[in-house]
Image (cartoon, coloured by chain):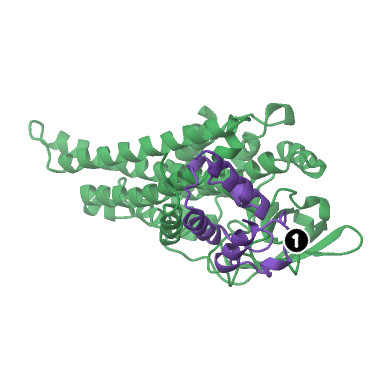
Chain colours: A purple, B green
Amino acid sequence: MSDQIRAILKEHGRLAVDVATLADDSDLYQAGMTSHASVNVMLALEGTFDLEFPDRMLRRDVFESISEIRNAIDELSKGR
Amino acid sequence: MDTVARIAREVAAPFADEVDRQARFPHESIEALRKARLMSALVPRDRGGAGCGMEELAAMCEILGQHCASSAMVFAMHHIQVASILRHAITQPYYAKYIAELAEKQYLIASATSEVGIGGEMRTSICAVERDAHGRFKLDKDCSTISYGAQADDILFQARRDAQAPSNDQIFVLVRKNEFTLTQKGAWDTLGMRGTCSPPFMLNSQGEVGQIFETPFADVTSETQVPFSHILWSNVWLGIATAAVSRARAFVRQQARAKPGTTPPTALRLAEVSSLLQTMRTNVHDVASECDALMRDEKNGTAALSSIAFALKMNNLKVSSSQLVVQIVHQTLLICGIMGYKNDSKVAVGRHLRDAHSAALMVGNDRIYATNASLLLVLKDD
């Protein structure tokens, strides 16, 4: 799953650094992801993983790092 | 609150036209607010302040806005900065000490959030912190505008974390009067809000690393700067609208007295504008009260304040009240006719109309609509 998340970040995250150089817990905002880019990342994640982030999860910290994103997706997939 | 009402009426109002005409700082009203110890209105009592909440402060902005919009806007902008320190940096020793000093000496804080070359996007910086090996930093910023920069004691502003950081990895920092120099780079000769004295400046500063907020600017923006700005500004605009409607009411009453028994045609327009004013007032108060509750909610407040739903609501408030204020004041001009158009008349609304037009530009409405458009792509309303 991390590879898919990384691919999405590479395409939509508009990061200032190569996503391959980031650790799973690196701060994506410090790596240059803007709030606008994070919206595109959310949309791509929803499309790729066929899920919808509920409003309570649409917070900055939920998309802060690759591992946080993975936790969020895990949580949503479990509920199905 | 009575004190603010008195200052607004007796100090801000008599100088409002002069402040506007000369585009000079409303130092009489700010001095009076200082003497009444209102620059620390938001500071909790145990830290030497008045312990007011956001709703009380919003009401103060409205009352001041009824009499002198420039004084009200300076007061509002100062408190947005105080609120940011209180919510995000008060646990840092430097700021605990600073707030105590602010409460004692009634400092005025300006903000330098604009920068030449970023196109009005506050969440982007070009300037960057340069740290040295002795725990000090140097920071220079080319600002397209700093409101009351020349009159402020201290300045709060954002910059990139360091020279390598991407443009949106920003920190927030306060520099004190003896730590910065401002070089004015242009004039402040504007349509309205002339007393805020907001020309472009080159800001050169230095300080201790302990002055840098530990909380990233991104969080300070979403949890405090945006909600406080949009709510306090909206209250200033509500004050402008209320004052203009009150002049229109005086005008219509006068017409009615001249011909008892017939309702003047302007009364219909007055009824119309009074409904608009009520819509604006209800919206502004409703959002302020919701935000106040979230700010006090220690358990779930932060999560709610940083949610997309809340950002959308705050942006909607700004856009709608900045449009309503212009619409309302414009209507009052139509009611008062030539008497509203004449600057020396008792029901003049020219200054109100010019001040009102600043509302749509303080963070451009189109930029806010663009943000909301993108937020709505992911928000589900569940």
> In the depicted view, which residue is nearer to us: B105 or A39?
A39
Q: Is residue B28 visible?
A: no
For residue A74, above or below residue B18: above
Q: Is B201 left or right of B208, judged from the image as shown? A: left
Q: Is residue A21 visible?
A: yes
Q: Position of residue A7 (x, y in %)?
A: 59, 65
Q: Is B376 left or right of B105, judged from the image as shown? A: left
Residue in view at x 62 percent, y 43 percent: B31
What is the quadrant of the N terminus of chain A in the image?
Answer: bottom right
> In the depicted view, which residue is nearer to us: B310 or B135?
B310
For residue B186, above or below residue B220: below
Residue in view at x 53 percent, y 55 percent: B196
For residue A26, above or below residue B143: above
- Residue annotated with mark 1: B180
**Quadrant of the rendered structure where residue B37 is?**
top right
**Mark 1 burial class by Cα count in 10 Å: few <14, some 14-19, many 20+:** some
> In the depicted view, which residue is nearer to us: A31 or B1?
A31
Q: Is disc 1 placed on a helix, strand or loop?
A: strand
Q: Position of residue B197 (x, y in %)?
A: 55, 59
Q: Chain of mark 1?
A: B
Q: Position of residue B64 (x, y in %)?
A: 48, 40
Q: Amino acid at mark 1?
A: Phe
For residue B216, above or below residue B119: above
Q: Residue furthest right?
A: B134
> In the depicted view, which residue is nearer to us: B276 or B72?
B276
Residue in view at x 62 percent, y 35 percent: B42
Q: Position of residue B229 (x, y in %)?
A: 53, 47
Q: Is B115 left or right of B165, judged from the image as shown? A: left
